[in-house]
Image (spheres, rainbow, N blue to C red):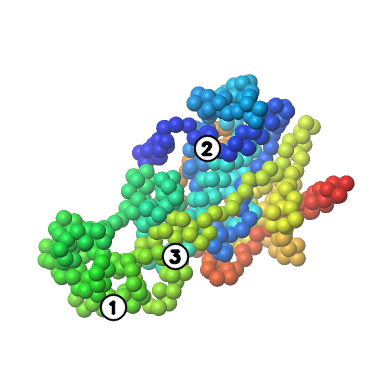
Amino acid sequence: MIMQITKNLYSSSLSLLTDLYQLTMAYGYWKSGKGEQESVFNLFFRRNPFKGGYVIACGLEYILDYLENFRLDETDIAYLASLKGNDGSMLFEQDFLDYLANLKFTCSVEAIPEGTVVFPNEPLIRVRGPIIQCQLIETPLLNIINFQSLIATKASRMCLATKGESVLEFGLRRAQGIDGGLAASRASYIGGCDATSNVLAGKLFGIPVKGTHAHSWVMSFENEIEAFETYAQVMPNNCVFLVDTYDTIQGVKHAIEVGKKLKEKGYKMVGIRLDSGDLAYLSIEARKILDEAGFQDTAIVASNDLDEYTVESLKHQDAKITMWGIGTKLVTAYDQPALGGVYKIAAIRKKDGNWSYKMKLSEQAIKVSNPGIQQVRRFYNDQEFLGDMIYDEETMPKTNVHTIIDPLDMTRSKTFDSSYQFEDLLVTVFDKGKSTYQSPNIEDIRKRVQNQLAKFHSGVKRFANPHTYPVGLEENLFKLKMELLTKLRKKEQI
């Protein structure tokens, strides 16, 4: 039921959710006879966001839905036919538009499952198929994975900061549009938040929804206690009172007065909410007042532009907050609003059937891409994850001993032998255009995040100067990259 609603979020085709240059390149491939040439593209990111130590992969379910429904309808073709070049003639000739109208997705796609902890340069998605199709889907894949992975990562950091205390996502009103609000609510829940204020996200994705009243409710009455009493009469099973409209301490006392009346009727005052002021001081004072009045189990909810650093500071100040409402700085990824994922060609099939490996050069070492048909192998023991190896499926040696080398610092290496367990992270989700993967439900994805994080050293999850988890190229792939790099550099000099 939930997924069917999700798939009908938009009634029109989303196949033109792309950049124009993807279509101009596709036209170029088609016109030059290269359109069906088999190629491999990898989607990855270069740096961890928020100066952190990891990323949570998120957004694959959206990708699956997009690719299953990938086709250009009559309105798409009509729009493309209306585009003009600088000379005033059609930008794309009619035969190409006819080709697009009949185009069916036939690529094979491998992806790292949602909820997996991932690291820079690891392919989160690998696409293999006709180059024209691989190119056309670049922008939507990046749009979906970049944003949802960023927000899921931010949410997980918030939850780490609260040390197990409940986090509520309250960001819809500050989110970047309708799409941003929905995707952020989904990614936040996957990242560890317990509920959302976003009712549509609750309907579409099955996320628990939470909420009470705003300052306008209190201000619409003659006084605060009348506002609380009326709310308690209307919603006796949902009473979290916002106590800082006028005077916070007095507001707590008013909430207690109403809470006692609720108790007499067999109901419970669930909590009070602080939305301004010195949250550490006010929460400590509120806790004393609540406890002395017999409301030891009443939660203290805090909001007000919180992020993981503010939460960590409040925890250090011994704030008595038991539930955290986090909005703007979560759903906008306030301190780093983009992940910066990229999508690069890594191999192309030659006429003789062999692969020609490709890589992007740059004067910045971090921007030199990795070639090959890449897979990621994660080594671990019974206690924790130990390191990730990016390897090329075509040149991977058949041995039980593997060495990984940091491509940015060849002096850093690590060797894994047969005593270590391992898992290959990329799994097939499309086989030659046919969907082969059943996405887990959102609860299972959310659990995967927690299970994954639990198996990483605490230093990887540290906010300040996190430990660098070992990720490197398998030795043969590293050598192949260096050979190709040398060859391409020499070509540049000619």
Q: Nearer the viewer, residue 227 or 393?
A: 227
Which residue corresponds to mark 2? Answer: 17
Q: Secondary structure at mark 1?
A: helix
Residue 148, given in percent of the width and then of the height, sits at 49, 50
Q: Nearer the viewer, residue 279 or 448?
A: 279
- Where on the picture, by quarter, is residue 10? top left
Residue type beneath disc 1: Glu
339 is higher (above) or lower (below) than 141: below
Q: Earlier in the sequence, mark 3 or mark 2?
A: 2
Q: Earlier in the sequence, mark 2 or mark 1?
A: 2
Quadrant that contains the N terminus: top left
Q: Earlier in the sequence, mark 1 or mark 3?
A: 1
Residue 384, given in percent of the width and then of the height, sits at 56, 64
Tell me if 40 is positioned left or right of 451 in this view.
right
Instruction: Write the residue at 33% across / 54% down.
Output: 197
Classed neighbour count for the residue bearing mark 1: other residues with Cα under 10 Å, few (<14), some (14–19), many (≥20): some
Which residue corresponds to mark 3? Answer: 307
Instruction: Write the residue at 15% across / 70% down.
Output: 257
Measure the C-alpha gap from mark 2 to mark 1.
52 Å
Tell me if 399 is positioned left or right of 256 in this view.
right
Which residue corresponds to mark 1? Answer: 285
240 is higher (above) or lower (below) than 423: below
